[in-house]
Amino acid sequence: MVARSTASRATGREFEDNHLMQEVKQADVFHSETATSVERWQQVGMTAVPLKQEQTQQQKNPEDPASSEENTGDDWNHGQPKGKAAEALMLYLNGSRSHPVALVDDRRVRPYGMKEGEGAHYAPDGSEQMSFFDENGHYVMSLDGPSVKDQKTNKTRFVSVRHVNKKMQSHDGTKVQEEKDYKHQGDTVNTEVRCSKNRIEFYSGDKLVGHYDKPSNTWELYESGGQFRVIINSTNVIGQYQDNKKSFRVDKDHTHIRYQDNTIWVDKDGCWCSAPLVVSSDTYE
């Protein structure tokens, strides 16, 4: 009996993160024993919100008194759900079952099969996104597709490395609810590199200043004012100021520079120009 009063296994129905210490909203322990608002202890520097418990077709609605097995005389289960869930180790400090704390893991989404010395911080939604470490390096990974949370949607995702501005969160317990919509990804972005399946994008603030397109094997770089652009692909390099009438181009057959109707180009046969050449000093030297 003493052991039962010290620690128990449980399943977590749902989790609440709008507290200084995350809480398990409902944890089903023994038959008909459901603890509420249980503190969940996590390692410093690591935090995540586990998925809700899955619902099954046979699951009764615990909020409907008429559906509770307690009211049918069959047993006194109080409608505890039976779907797959995150699991908790409930610790009853000093043997008191009135104020447990929970240690939580979720075998629905945890990556497995790692080798000695490897580690990861992974997405708790079961999308296989992760930050992974091995002896060769550190990998930050995202991928398109469904997740355990949403198995029907083939979602498109990206990886973002960004420098941001954001206000510090208050750790005054009286203000936590005021900050429940806090933007952990940043209020505004200073600089960012964003990778998706077919593109690498570069941002200055919210302005796109360059990208690489994988299907066309093309780089485009442009300054934030939108006046100048450089295009690099498998056939040529093009530079433009405002439009193609102020431009340069290099490809395997020729090189040219252009300013409005004046053009100079060079190919294997010689050097050519669209207007007579005038010898003069360069004012931009």
Image (cartoon, rainbow, N blue to C red):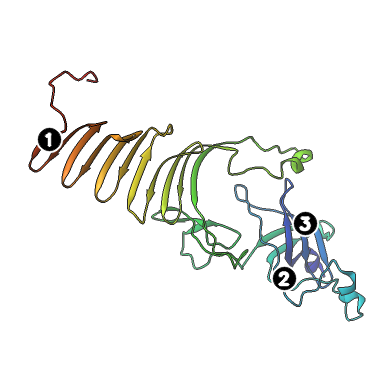
Quadrant of res 187: top right
Q: CA distance from mark 3 to mark 1?
A: 81 Å
How many numbered circles are shown?
Answer: 3
Q: Nearer the viewer, mark 1 or mark 2?
A: 1
**Residue type, label 1:** Trp
Mark sitting on residue 39: none
Q: Quadrant of the C terminus?
A: top left
Observer-nearest residue: 55 or 5? Answer: 55
N-term-proximal mark, 3 vs 2 = 3
Q: Nearer the viewer, residue 173 or 201?
A: 201
Q: In the picture, residue 232 is in which quadrant?
A: top left
Side (left or right) of 263 relative to 73: left
Q: Secondary structure at mark 3?
A: strand
Label 1, residues with CA under 10 Å away: few <14, some 14-19, many ≥20:
some
Mark whose residue sits in front, 3 or 2: 2
In x, y percent, where is residue 51? 66, 61
> Would you name the residue on which mark 2 appears?
55
Dot 2: element: loop
> Which circle's residue, 3 or 1, is located before the other in the chain?
3
Q: Looking at the picture, which amino acid does disc 3 mark?
A: Val
Is residue 76 among what the camera can see?
Answer: no
Quadrant assignment for the N terminus: bottom right
Q: Which residue is mark 3?
A: 38
For disc 1, the marked residue is 272
Q: Is residue 133 above or below residue 251?
A: below
